[in-house]
Image (cartoon, grey):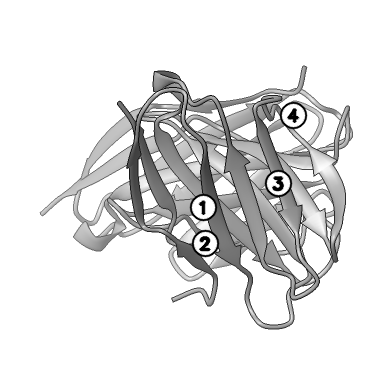
Amino acid sequence: DSGVTQTPKHLITATGQRVTLRCSPRSGDLSVYWYQQSLDQGLQFLIQYYNGEERAKGNILERFSAQQFPDLHSELNLSSLELGDSALYFCASSVGRWAEETQYFGPGTRLLVL
Amino acid sequence: GENVEQHPSTLSVQEGDSAVIKCTYSDSASNYFPWYKQELGKRPQLIIDIRSNVGEKKDQRIAVTLNKTAKHFSLHITETQPEDSAVYFCAALTMDSSYKLIFGSGTRLLVRP
């Protein structure tokens, strides 16, 4: 157990819908990272937040947005969902702002868009 | 853009043999290279990492080597065991357009008993 929690574990929804994925970092960690893992694909970095502020951005679609709240939990919002958005979404956390610090991954949320 | 290539995509070895996975990266400014192990249905877990100021790092049966000139790094697992069976991902920290980890596409390692 890494100490990073994610909810929900599974999510099934329809195209065009909007969902929110939630992540709580390890106690004391200030950075949260979001990754997308499609079937048979590697991990694609989406976005990083550090202490409430956006720190780095990857190939995150405009339909996707994220935020980090004062209690440091983070939410990833996916809207106008398409079939291709079906994937495993991981969040990770680290102590500081630097991406080369050890990132601890949560258990993931498996999203299926029908 | 930034890219990390990983080979092979699948690797099958006999228990006790060694396994080697290789990665190349494109951003010459990269200075941090972690390796993650992901068991089926589980989260990725960091198993070893290396920074650009060293050429090799070892942790028990696992070692990583880095060649900055050639921009490639490798994971070596010796005396493989069935519990080593998993998908292994390499990554490189890129500072090109955004400060982030770029992951390879993964290697599925199968250790045959």
Residue at point 72%, 66% (across, down)? A94
**Location of mark 4 (residue):** B71
Residue B40 x/y as whole percent:
27, 51
Question: What amino acid is found at the position of numbered circle 4 in the picture?
Answer: Lys
Q: Would you call the spot at circle 1 few (<14 residues within 10 Å), some (14-19), or many (20 or more)? A: many
- Left or right for A59, reference B59: right
Q: Chain of mark 3?
A: A
Asked if both marks, 1 and 3, belong to the same chain, the answer given is no
Residue at point 49%, 45% (across, down)? A89
**Do the residues under discs 2 and 1 have CB atoms within 8 angstroms?**
yes
Residue B12 or residue B2, whichever sits in front: B2
Question: What amino acid is found at the position of numbered circle 3 in the picture?
Answer: Ala
- Left or right for A114, reference B45: left
Q: Earlier in the sequence, mark 4 or mark 2?
A: 2
Residue B37 x/y as whole percent:
44, 54
Residue A51 x/y as whole percent:
85, 66
- The residue mark sitting in front, 1 or 4, is 1
Question: What amino acid is found at the position of numbered circle 1 in the picture?
Answer: Tyr
**Location of mark 3 (residue):** A66
Give the CA separation, mark 4 to mark 3. Answer: 33 Å
Q: Would you call the spot at circle 3 few (<14 residues within 10 Å), some (14-19), or many (20 or more)? A: some
Residue at point 35%, 57% (across, down)? B42
**Location of mark 2 (residue):** B47
**Do the residues under discs 3 and 2 have CB atoms within 8 angstroms?**
no
Image quadrant assignment for residue B74: top right
Q: Chain of mark 1?
A: B
Image quadrant assignment for residue B28: top right
Query: Label for residue B36?
Result: 1
